[in-house]
Amino acid sequence: MKKILTNVVSVVLIAGMALSIASCGKKIEPVKDKDFKKALEESFDIDDDEYTEYDDKDFSGKHRSFYNEKAGYGYILLNGESEDNDFVDDKVYGGIYWSGDTFIIILVTSDKDKYVDNVTALIRALGYPKP
């Protein structure tokens, strides 16, 4: 449980860092894996055994992303199965949405209809695109 919490906190901190950079008007450029790992370790004192690297080959299903640089918003939508075995090892349905300085993650890691229906209802109520 501690490792999952560490992973979630890591993602949130990284997202916050990325959004704070974006809100300053600086364009976010792609980062090399080794530079990103070094930044994590130096900034948050997180060792490489305390976070999860995710590879696209570990995900099967539908996914799509969109980013409008001029308007400053975007999303990543997921509907499939992850075989990561660390962070998400199951069905995954939902999305990661951001606009300006707001970052929202709406995901369910279950294929039970009631949970997927709840996530779909929340996404619809917010007016966000669904997976």
Image (cartoon, grey):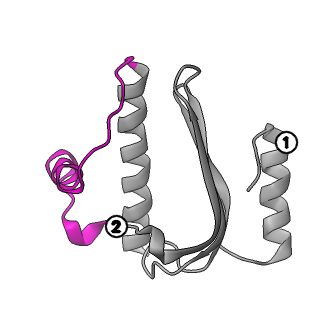
**Amino acid on which disc 2 is placed:** Glu
Residue 130 in view, yes or no: yes
Residue sitting nearer the eye, 24 or 13: 24
* In the foreground, 94 or 12: 94
Residue under the image location 21 percent in, 56 percent down:
37
Total of numbered circles in the picture?
A: 2
- Label 2 crowd (10 A; few <14 / some 14-19 / many >=20): few
Secondary structure under the numbered disc 1 in the rendered image: helix
In the image, which disc is placed on residue 2?
none
Q: Which mark is residue 125?
A: 1
Quarter of the picture containing the N terminus is bottom left
Span of residues in magenta: 24-52
> Is 64 on the left-hand or right-hand side of 6?
right
Cα separation between marks 1 and 2: 32 Å
Q: Residue at x 77, y 51 (%)?
A: 130
* Along the line of sight, the residue nearer the viewer: 40 or 5: 40
- Per the image, label 2 sits on a secondary structure element best described as loop
Percent across and percent down for residue 42 are 14, 48
Residue 53: numbered disc: 2
Q: Quadrant of the C terminus?
A: bottom right
Task: Return the x and y of residue 71 as percentages of the image width and height.
Answer: 59, 21
- In which quarter of the view is residue 86 placed? bottom left
